[in-house]
């Protein structure tokens, strides 16, 4: 194998390929990037237990003197290409044991691995695609992924559920303590119900960060393939039945309080400075507990009391309030702040049913987005 390519083109594609590289792997071959040079194209492939990525480079700057295949240490290869500053990079094999990287006056040599040891990756057949714009995918990730579980005790909750019916997709994420749900309108397409690992969705969103265009999605029983430009990004799907959540988000709420989103975030952040940290044993995280007191005189107070440290109390003026009884409810300030930041609306509403019932956050302009938070008991 002997090729020359524009360094910027190579870096651009290596940044995408890096999404499929594992930090550690029981199979050392998977820590490498597979390079396949044909007579006209250069294919780069990476894979781990969740994600497989392949890019097809067919750029005018690509000059292939001789074809061939090899597997190079992934992280080292990427670091070298990023650090060199020449316009073009020449890659060739020496004695079928070494990959030589030549750039201007610099030369690097990497020990290679046998491409025959690299596992064959079966990508999903490119048939009957679901087409979504990259902006839609990014918005889905922004509004849902943060609500997934980080605990492997319930693996299904570490993913985001996509349930398609009636020409729309209901996208849901929950860790049992909060829930994020976004509805995406689509054209006519077959019904499906899949759960995608949150990490895979996050990596795909990063991969398309600078891409503005449509993405084709293809399904199999246990895999999802996203195809755009010259990239194929494949992830495994999670097994199991996702919990039924429709009743929670479709419940009726007779208490509604509206706020300016930014003012509420700032007030919650200030009060949280002195809030007691409680531990969620399932997720092994600490978070801040605060109280929201909605009074019948149409005032709202956010407060906290941290024994041996101090207390904080701040009154915030709602833009609208409709309550039948005074309510004092306690919850994680981090959960509320993350939920609020998922909205594009400047005005949001808290919809409550009682002091120990889940409450819902909605945005005036985000009609298709719902955030739900479970309260904690304030004894």
Image (tube, rainbow, N blue to C red):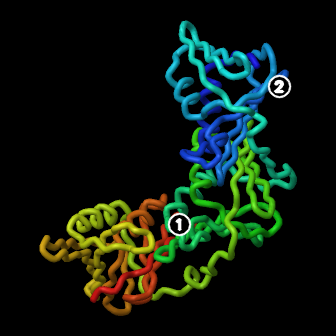
For the question of whether residue 139 can be seen, the reply is yes
Q: From what the image shows, is residue 291 above or below residue 286? A: below
The reply, left or right, for residue 301 in relation to residue 139 is left
For the question of whether residue 61 can be seen, the reply is no
Q: Position of residue 137 (x, y in %)?
A: 63, 53
Q: Mark 2 or mark 1: which is in front?
A: 2
How far, Cα to Cα, is label 2 from label 1?
A: 42 Å
Q: Position of residue 19 (x, y in %)?
A: 60, 43
* Quadrant of the image containing the C terminus: bottom left
Residue lying at 52% horizontally and 16% vertically, measured from the top left:
85
**In this view of the protein, which residue sits in the foreground, 144 or 43?**
43
Q: Position of residue 4 (x, y in %)?
A: 70, 15
Give the mark nearer the N terminus: 2 vs 1: 2
Residue that mark 2 sits on = 38
Q: Position of residue 109 (x, y in %)?
A: 59, 19
The reply, left or right, for residue 102 in relation to residue 142 is right
The reply, left or right, for residue 250 in relation to residue 95 is left
The reply, left or right, for residue 247 in relation to residue 236 is left
As helix, strand or loop, the secondary structure at mark 2 comes to loop
Residue lying at 56% horizontally and 24% vertically, measured from the top left:
81
* Quadrant of the image containing the N terminus: top right
Q: From what the image shows, is residue 129 above or below residue 158? A: above
As helix, strand or loop, the secondary structure at mark 1 comes to loop
Q: Residue furthest bottom?
A: 325
Residue lying at 63% horizontally and 54% vertically, measured from the top left:
136
The quadrant holding residue 306 is: bottom left
Say the numbered circle drawn on residue 148: 1
């Amino acid at each position: 194998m002997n090729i020359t390519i524009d360094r910027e083109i190579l870096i651009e594609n290596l940044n995408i390929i890096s999404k499929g590289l594992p930090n550690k792997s029981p199979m050392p071959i998977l820590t490498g990037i597979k390079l396949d040079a044909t007579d006209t194209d250069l294919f780069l492939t990476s894979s781990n237990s969740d994600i497989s990525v392949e890019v097809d480079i067919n750029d005018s700057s690509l000059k292939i003197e001789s074809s061939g295949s090899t597997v190079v240490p992934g992280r080292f290869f990427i670091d070298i290409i990023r650090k060199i500053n020449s316009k073009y990079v020449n890659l060739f094999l020496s004695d079928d044991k070494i990959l030589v990287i030549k750039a201007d006056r610099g030369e690097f040599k990497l020990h290679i691995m046998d491409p025959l040891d690299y596992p064959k990756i079966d990508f999903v057949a490119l048939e009957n695609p679901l087409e979504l714009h990259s902006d839609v995918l990014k918005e889905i990730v922004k509004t849902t992924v943060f609500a997934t579980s980080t605990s492997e005790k319930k693996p299904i909750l570490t993913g985001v559920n996509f349930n398609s019916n009636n020409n729309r997709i209901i996208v849901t994420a929950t860790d049992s303590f909060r829930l994020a749900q976004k509805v995406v309108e689509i054209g006519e397409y077959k019904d499906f119900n899949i759960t995608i690992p949150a990490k895979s969705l996050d990596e795909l969103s990063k991969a398309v960060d600078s891409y503005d265009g449509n993405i084709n999605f293809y399904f199999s029983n246990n895999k999802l393939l996203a195809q755009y430009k010259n990239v194929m990004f494949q992830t495994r799907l999670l097994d199991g039945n996702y919990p039924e959540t429709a009743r929670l988000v479709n419940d009726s709420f007779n208490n509604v309080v509206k706020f300016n989103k930014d003012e509420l975030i700032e007030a919650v952040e200030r009060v949280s400075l002195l809030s007691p940290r409680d531990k969620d044993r399932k997720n092994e995280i600490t978070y801040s507990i605060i109280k929201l007191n909605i009074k019948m005189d149409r005032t709202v107070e956010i407060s906290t009391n941290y024994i041996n440290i101090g207390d904080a109390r701040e009154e915030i003026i709602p833009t609208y309030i409709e309550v039948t009884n005074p309510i004092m409810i306690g919850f994680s300030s981090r959960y509320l702040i993350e939920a609020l930041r998922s909205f594009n609306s400047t005005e949001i509403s808290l919809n409550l049913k009682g002091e120990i019932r889940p409450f819902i956050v909605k945005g005036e302009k985000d009609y298709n987005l719902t955030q739900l938070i479970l309260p904690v008991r304030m004894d």
